[in-house]
Image (tube, rainbow, N blue to C red):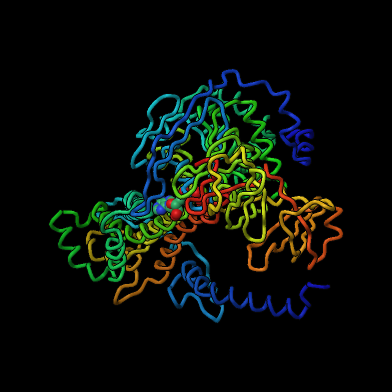
Amino acid sequence: MSAMTEAAEEREPRAKASVEETPLPASAPRPIRCAARGVKKAFGKTQILKGVDLEIAEGSFAVLVGPSGCGKSTLLRLVAGLEEADEGKLEIAGRDVTRAPPRDRDIAMVFQSYALYPHLSVRDNLAFGLRLKKTPQAEIDKRIDEASQMLGLGHLLDRLPKQLSGGQRQRVAMGRAIVRRPNLFLFDEPLSNLDAALRAEVRVEIRRMHERLGATTLYVTHDQVEAMTLADTLWVLNGGLVEQKGAPLDVYARPRTKFVATFLGSPQMNLAEGKLQKASGGGFVAEGGGMALEVDVERFGAALEDGREVALGVRPHDLRVAQPGESPSLELRVEIVEALGFEAYAYGWAKASGPRVIVRLEAEHARRARPGDVIPLVAPPEHVHLFCQKSGVALDAE
Amino acid sequence: MDDKPSVLERVVVHLLLVGAVAFALYPVLWVVSLALSQGGLSGTGGVVPLPRAPTLENFRLVLGTTDPDGAWLFGRQLANSIVVSLATAAVGIAVAIPAAYALARFPFVGKEAGVRALLATQMFPTVASAVPLYLLLDKLHMLDSRGGLVLVYAATSVPFAIFQLRGAFSQIPVDLEEAAMVDGATRFQAFVKVTLPAARPAIAVTALFAFMSAWNEFILAATLLSREDAFTLPVVLQRYVGEHDAAWGSFAAGAILVSVPVMALFYVAQRELVSGLTAGGVKG
Ligand SMILES: Nc1ncnc2c1ncn2[C@@H]1O[C@H](COP(=O)(O)OP(=O)(O)OP(=O)(O)O)[C@@H](O)[C@H]1O
Ligand SMILES: [Mg+2]
């Protein structure tokens, strides 16, 4: 090993430096579409997927989120061909692959455990799939070169997996997918074994890699930061069904159900059970849990009925402290204040018997807030969400 | 803080170690000494057994045995031992690998019962089946043959080998095979190219164990073999200490000759035995 590469090893070169210079792969795959139609899957008597429809456009980055155990991995494994669907159809690149074995699907997958072949060097790990396809050695070398430049793996090629750190293993796992130039990239929580700092870094790298390769991608996570930042389209899976899909910001701004509303966003959206009241001047106010929130009449339209029972919601970030003289939507009795430096949260109640309410405070208010204080808060109507109490579906999505 | 042991501590530890080594090696010293002496037990003496007049005569005698026709008998017997032991290991492993893999990976009807049955076979000492085995091999005309012995040894080594390998295969994450299949391998290729190499240390240990049990086995060999040129080395050794006269010198020399290949094998296999190749493939 030359002195130069030794030095490089010390500094742990990151991909950032080299990404811009690396030429695009000579024959980057033409992006393809992937779709699941009415896919059902049960393990024993437990129905895990109850008819999932999924559609990933050419070259787009789809993120599948949902609570633990909702079947995200199962769906991904169905797409990979590692499990077989009980019902429904899977299409990759316009071809029905429902019954095709994994090797006939032209996919690459990054496992949560990385699943590097322990007896093979990094180089041989990368070459494994290409050798199976009898790719000429020169081409294999070229692709390994490209991928290792892109991911900063150059100095690791001759090591065994056990001689790598967690982050390096993760990179090798991604490299193994990249060299294959697959139709479809599959990721199953690839960052969950990394520490927070590295996770943020690799997250950005994954997005960058996607932008460079432009390959269709399906990414599973239960981390909402990953979901929000990586996705072109977000698919929220719950109870074996797709609960909502859409651009991440749209899903965040207009959650279709109570579940989606609380699942996305941290801290969670404040929710309370209450009733709609017709106000003077044609407006509506949703009252409950000690809150009286003015409602966006245009958004909810005909769904608004005087006296209708609803669940009302407003995110901690959307509440603001009332100006002097302004009539507040709620008065928060503060229990504790959490100051994170760049922002602060006050936890408390708007009514003794009501649900807990969380609000994000600006630095100036946070400094003054003390447990026991009462803070008057205003919820702007455009940020007030209403859900049917029975079905949990948003009133504007019924 | 000074965490170096004191002088006293070190002296005590070393005395204990010397004692343990002496305890372990004393019998071996006797054997070496006997092998190098003439005149059996009277050729050495004292608390520390040292040959009075060191000589290689015993080795020459043992190595140079010939049958009535003048063919080299010891060579033939050594070959018997080597061939039988290697074949036992090979056949045992070849049979055990697929069985162990199936038990480790797939659910199937009768799996639990099968495992229990395997365990049950281990409860009976092999001597218990010496007579039926003799009758079976007699019917098959395989008495006094290497093949017959391999058949018997491999059969007795398979259950244990299956247990060992089943454990090894279940330690190897399924993810690895799935990754290989996504990478374009068939299920069989994934097994051959990923699972088997990842299980190599365990396979090596299991094979070595099968080899050793065949190499050392005496009772069945003595029962199933009656012709001198079919003997394996343990049987040959036993013949040196007969009822009336015991050729302790030859016995000791033979014992050393029998041990050497095993020691060599251990030396060669060391790397496999200690390496944990699977470490690091999956998160950690
Ligand atoms: N091979 C299997 N046999 C039986 N049950 C299974 C199997 N695989 C998954 N399950 C069950 O299916 C459900 C969904 O599992 P899945 O791994 O898809 O969840 P997930 O959404 O990926 O969760 P997580 O976020 O925790 O990874 C779980 O309740 C799990 O116990
Ligand atoms: Mg999962």
Q: Position of residue B153 (x, y in %)?
A: 30, 58
- As drawn, the residue found furthest toward the top would be A26
Please provide percent x and percent y for residue A342.
81, 50
Q: In this view, does A286 lie above or below B247?
A: above
Identity of the residue drawn at 27% across and 71% down:
B124
Examine the rendering and report whether any part of residue B192 can be seen.
no
**Residue B181 placement (x, y as % from top left):** 44, 37
Q: In this view, does A174 lie to the left or right of A369?
A: left
Residue placed most toward the observer, B43 or A6? A6
Q: Residue at x 64, y 21 (%)?
A: A24
Q: Which of A190 and B150 is in front in this view?
A: A190
- Residue at the image point whose x is 57% and y is 53% from the top: A311
Q: Residue B130's image quarter?
A: bottom left
Quarter of the view holding residue A337: bottom right
User: Residue lying farthest front?
Assistant: A280
On screen, residue A170 above or below B271: above
Task: Decide if residue A1 is on the left or right side of residue A183.
Answer: right
What x and y, as percent, mark residue B51?
A: 52, 72
Q: Residue B47 or A265: which is nearer the viewer? A: A265
For this view, does A213 lie left or right of residue B117? Answer: right
Is the N terminus of chain A in the top left, top right, bottom left or bottom right quadrant? top right
Count of marks, rendered view: 0
Task: Using the rendered image of the protein, determine whether residue A213 is visible from the camera's viewpoint.
Answer: yes
Asked if B131 appears above or below A389 in the picture, the reply is below
Q: In this view, does B49 lie to the left or right of A333?
A: left
Query: Which of A119 and A82 lies nearest the eye of the viewer?
Result: A82
